[in-house]
Every structure is written in C-alpha cells, then in structure tokens.
Amino acid sequence: MTVLVTARLEGTPITSDAGPLLAGLLTDPRVARTLGGVPSPDALAGMVARQAAHWVAHGFGYWLWRDRATGAVVARGGLHHVVVGGRAEVEVGWAVDADRWGEGLASELGAAAVAFAFGRLDLHEIVSFTLPANMTSRRVMEKLGFAREGAQVEHAGMDHVLYRLLAPSTTTGPQGELA
C-alpha cells in the first residue's frame, strides 16, 4: 500500500487497527461538526473497517496523516469511492485536527491526494463535497482547483455542496511524493 509524503506530513493507509488513532480526531466536536456529527464507538469502528477494506479492494483510500516533525496524528484524508447525487464518484476528503486548523494541512494533504488520483490512478475526474456551512473546506477545494457544480446534493441524509476537478494534462501545484 502506498505511503504519501509531503513537506510536513506523512500519510499511511488506514488499516483495521487505526480506530484508537482516529478516535480523538473524529470524535472532537469541532471536527465532527464538519462531518455531520460525533460518531458512536460502533459507528467509528465500522467507519475504520470500511476504510481499511477500501484499500484492500481498490488499492487506494484514506490515509492517516502524521506530522513528520512530531509523529502526531493530525488528519485523515484521501480518496474513496462514493455515490453522491445518485452518481458513482471518487471523492477526495479530509478531516484535520481542530488544533491545527489554519495551518494549510488540508490543502497539503488534499494536493497530495489529487496528484495521486491523476498521476497514479489515472482518473479523469474527482469530486469533493462538504456541508454548505463549511466554508473552510470549500475554500480548500477551490484552492486545489475544484469548481462548484450545480445545486446541493444529498449525501448521508444531509445536503452537501459538490465540487468537481477534471484531470489536467499536467498536475501542478504543491504535490506529495511517494515514499
């Protein structure tokens, strides 16, 4: 499985034993508010199991991102198959430790995931979506080159704004390198 390295981060594929590492991040009310709510312990365990299984089935998925300087887990993010607005897509998504918001980590890991999607997976397009009020993630999507698409779409029983990015002939911008 692929490890991604950026200037400040190292991303390793999420495995079935990542629950304790992700619990603090995904149950933080500040982070959970951007993801639709705090997951129960059972929901968190199911989420981790699905994300680990995605790697096995597809050869890509969400990475667990650590600060290279400290080794601390600071984010979860990457690529996964999803149905949104009734259409099968590959989404890039992220969740960053709230204590690290404003440092550009979502943009950094998002750029690495986009580069992987277009460079290694040879995808022609990817999407990203968030709750309408999550203006910070929307700005990250726009910084990465995504464009808002249409009206709101339903995902997980909630309205979301959908953004799409088509593969350029050459991916530019801050990219991660494969370790």
Image (spheres, rainbow, N blue to C red):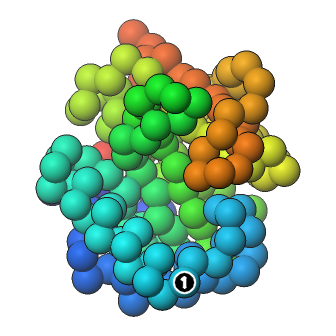
Q: Name the amino acid type tagged 1.
A: Ser
Which residue is rendered at x = 54% and y = 84% of the image?
A: 40
Quadrant into which the N terminus falls = bottom left
Q: Nearer the viewer, residue 46 or 51?
A: 46
Q: Is residue 179 above or below residue 146?
A: below
Q: Secondary structure at mark 1?
A: loop
* Residue 79 appears left or right of 58: right
Q: Is residue 94 above or below residue 121?
A: below
**Residue 88 sits in which quadrant?**
top left
Q: Nearer the viewer, residue 4 or 82?
A: 82
Quadrant into which the C terminus falls = bottom left
* Residue 37 appears left or right of 74: right
**Residue 64 sits in which quadrant?**
bottom left
Which residue is rendered at x = 54% and y = 23% of the image?
A: 165
Q: Would residue 24 be seen by someone viewing this image from the given angle? A: yes
Which residue is rendered at x = 52% and y = 29% of the image?
A: 86
Q: Is residue 13 above or below residue 176?
A: below
* Residue indicated by mark 1: 40
Q: Is residue 125 above or below residue 23?
A: above
Q: Would residue 179 be seen by someone viewing this image from the given angle? A: no
Which residue is rendered at x = 29% and y = 28% of the image?
A: 119
* Residue 29 appears left or right of 177: right
Q: Nearer the viewer, residue 165 or 102?
A: 165
Percent across and percent down for residue 51 are: 33, 62
Percent across and percent down for residue 105 are: 59, 59
Label count reads 1
Q: How crowded is the residue under tag 1: few (<14 C-alpha within 10 Å), some, or many (20+)? A: few
